[in-house]
Amino acid sequence: MIAPIDLLVATAPDWFTVRDRTVNQIRGEAAHGPWAGSPLDLTILSAPCPIVRETKPGTRFPAFCPDRHIQGDRTFCVGLGRGPIDSLRRARAWWADLDQYLACQAIAEATRLWPPQNALDHGPAGLYHQRALRVAERLGIMDAYLDAYFDQPSWITSTGLTKLGERRVRLTGPVVARAPQMKGDRKARLLLLELVMAERKRRAALADYKKRISNGTQTCCGAMRDCGFPKADALAA
C-alpha cells in the first residue's frame, strides 16, 4: 500500500514545490495566485487525514481567524468530511480542495470577505450547514434554503406548528410562506423535516460558537470585516 505522503507528493500540482519531506510530513512552497512571486511556506501533516497550515503560523495569514477559515490549532479548514488519502484520486481531490481554499484566501485578502458560496459555518454548525445544503439540493429548493440561511423571509424559519412528514415541529421566525406541498410523497416530506431541523440546529450551534469565541481573550486582528471576535479596545474597556 502506498503511503499517504507518497500519494500527495506524486500528485502535487505545478503551483506547489516540495522542499522537504518525512514519512508523515511535507514542507513546501505554494506559488498560488497573488503569492506566485512570493510563495507561501506550508506544512502538510498526513495522519490520519491531511491537515495543512503555515509552517510559521501568522506569517502571511492570520494565525487564527474563523472568517478566514483558520482554526484555533492554526490549521486551515480546507473542508469537512474528507477521508484518509488512500488513492491517487483522493490525493488529487485533496489538492483540488487546497487549490480552491487558497483561491478563497486570495479573495478574502483583497476584499476582507470570504466568498459565501465557498463557506460552511464555523465549528459544529458546519456539519448542520453541510447537511442542510445537501438536502435542499436533493429536494431542488436551494433558493428557498438560501433565503432562510441569509435571514430572508422563509417558510423554513416560520412560526407556528407546521406539519412535515408525520411530525409536528414548532418553528421560529416570521411567518411569510408555506412549505412546498408534497402530498403523497412521504420521503420528500421527511426530507423537508430534516432540512428544517438541520437549519434550526445550525443556528443554535453557530450562536453557541460565536458566544464562546466572544467570551475568550482572542481579539480581532482586522483581517476581515467582522469575524466575531471582540476588538482589542473593547476588551481593554
Image (cartoon, rainbow, N blue to C red):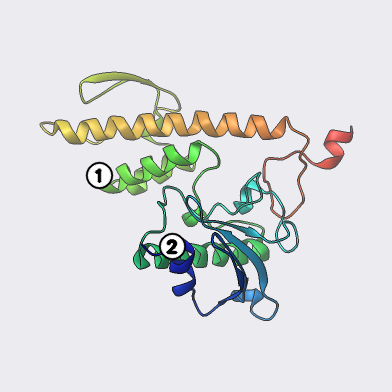
**What is the residue that sits farthest to the right in this orientation?**
237
Mark sitting on residue 3: 2
Identify which amino acid the numbered label 1 is placed on.
Leu
- Distance from disc 2 to disc 1, alpha carbons, whole Å, reads 39 Å
Q: Quadrant of the C terminus?
A: top right
Tally the numbered discs.
Answer: 2
> Contact (CB < 8 A) between labels 2 and 1?
no
Nearer to me, 214 or 29: 29
Q: Is residue 163 above or below residue 92?
A: above
Mark 2 or mark 1, which is nearer to you?
2
Instruction: Return the x and y of residue 201 as percentages of the image width and height.
Output: 44, 29
Identify which amino acid the numbered label 2 is placed on.
Ala
Residue at 57 percent across and 31 percent down: it is 207
Q: Earlier in the sequence, mark 2 or mark 1?
A: 2
Q: Which residue is mark 1?
A: 139
Mark sitting on residue 189: none
Residue at 75 percent across and 62 percent down: it is 59
Viewer can see residue 177: no
Nearer to me, 102 or 177: 102
